[in-house]
Amino acid sequence: MTTAQTITLDFDDEMASTRKLLELVPLDNGLRGYKPHPKSMALSYLATHVAELPSWAKMALETEVFELPVDFKPPEAQSKAELLAMFDKAVQEGRAALGAATESDMQKTWSFKYGGVVVYSDTRPKVIRGFLNHLVHHRAQLGVYLRLNNIPIPGMYGPSADDGK
C-alpha cells in the first residue's frame, strides 16, 4: 500500500463523519453569526472552513509552496445547500489528488508562507495528515456549537450521547 493510499483510508473515514455533522449546521435559521465566546469564530465561518479543508490535500499535492495573501478574505457559505456543495467538491478534489499521488510526489516538501515568511514546512504526508487533524479539531468545535444550541450530535467514532435516543 502506498503512502497516499494509507492516508486515503483516514481521509475517507473523516469525510464521512464530517458530512454527517455538516448536514446539521443551521445556516438557514438565524444562527449564522452564533459564537459561544467573543473570541470564537462565527458558526457560518467555522462551518465553511470545515467544508473547505478536504481540498487542502489537493493544494499540498499540486504546489510546493502556498502563500496566503495578507488581505485574504475567506468565503462563507450562505446556506446549508451551499455548504454541502462546497464540502462535496472539496472532498472530490482532495480524494482525486490523493488517488493520483505517487510515492515520489509524497516525498516532496510543502511550505506555507504568510507575509512573505515561511511559517510551516514539512513533507507532504505530514502536511496532509496535519490538515486532517486540523479538520477534526474544527469539526469538534463545530460539534460544541451545535450541542450548545440543542442540536443532537451524531457519533463520529462510535455512538454519541444522542444516538438512539
Image (cartoon, helix red, strand yellow):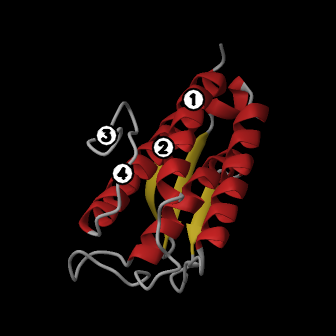
The spot of residue 2 in percent (x, y) is 66, 18
Residue type of the residue flagged with mark 2: Leu
| Distance between mark 1 and mark 3 Cα atoms | 25 Å
Mark on residue 153? 4
Residue type of the residue flagged with mark 4: Ile
- Nearer the observer: mark 4 or 1; the answer is 4
Q: Is residue 149 visible?
A: yes
The spot of residue 123 in percent (x, y) is 53, 37
Judging by the rendered image, the residue that carries numbered circle 2 is 132
82 displayed left or right of 164: right
Crowd band around label 4 with a 10 angstrom C-alpha radius: few (<14), some (14–19), many (20+): some
Judging by the rendered image, the residue that carries numbered circle 1 is 7
Q: In the structure shown, which secondary structural element does the residue marked by tag 3 occupy?
A: loop
Q: Of the two numbered discs 1 and 3 on the same chain, state the one appearing first in sequence.
A: 1
Crowd band around label 1 with a 10 angstrom C-alpha radius: few (<14), some (14–19), many (20+): some
Tell me where residue 105 sits by quadrant: top right
| Distance between mark 2 and mark 1 Cα atoms | 9 Å
| Distance between mark 4 and mark 1 Cα atoms | 26 Å
Q: Is residue 117 visible?
A: no
Q: Of the two numbered discs 2 and 3 on the same chain, state the one appearing first in sequence.
A: 2
Q: Of the two numbered discs 2 and 4 on the same chain, state the one appearing first in sequence.
A: 2
- Nearer the observer: mark 1 or 3; the answer is 3
Residue type of the residue flagged with mark 1: Ile
